[in-house]
Image: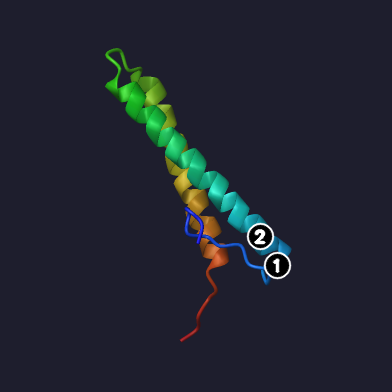
């Protein structure tokens, strides 16, 4: 299993592989933004506007991550 919990399988379709790769990219960017926000917040003159923009981008990424995860999860009709 990969660090992100997503395995690439020989049985994956091209679309599934693309979605898994995109999910990894989004999660990496989300983690990088988290670190950038923490660094700005820790600095003595942390720019509140810049932090707010980064947090907004982080929320957008979270929405995209959720969308991709939903695309990769099969619908189960009970």
What label does residue 13 carry, if any? 1
What label does residue 40 carry, if any? none
Q: Position of residue 26 (x, y in %)?
A: 53, 45
16 up-or-down from 32: above or below? below
Q: Quadrant of residue 25?
A: top right
Nearest the eye: 7 or 42 = 7
In the image: residue 69, left or right of residue 51: right
Give me the residue at 52% from left, 63% from top: 70
Give me the residue at 44% from left, 34% from top: 33
Q: Residue furthest toward the top?
A: 45
Nearest the eye: 54 or 39 = 39
> Secondary structure beneath disc 2?
helix
Give me the residue at 39% from left, 32% from top: 35
Give me the residue at 54% from left, 50% from top: 24
42 up-or-down from 34: above or below? above
In the image: residue 12, left or right of residue 76: right
41 up-or-down from 20: above or below? above
Q: Position of residue 2 (x, y in %)?
A: 51, 57
Asked if the residues shown at circle 2 and circle 1 are in contact, with their CB atoms under 8 angstroms apart, the answer is yes
> Secondary structure beneath disc 1?
loop
Q: Residue furthest toward the right?
A: 14
Q: CA distance from mark 2 to mark 1?
A: 6 Å
Q: Position of residue 34 (x, y in %)?
A: 39, 35
Q: Which residue is mark 2?
A: 17
């Amino acid at each position: 299993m990969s660090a992100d919990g997503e395995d690439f399988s020989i049985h994956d379709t091209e679309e599934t592989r693309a979605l898994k790769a995109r999910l990894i990219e989004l999660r990496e960017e989300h983690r990088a933004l988290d670190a950038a926000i923490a660094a700005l917040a820790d600095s003595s003159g942390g720019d509140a506007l810049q932090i707010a923009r980064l947090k907004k981008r982080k929320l957008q990424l979270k929405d995209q991550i959720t969308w991709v995860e939903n695309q990769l999860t099969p619908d189960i009709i009970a």
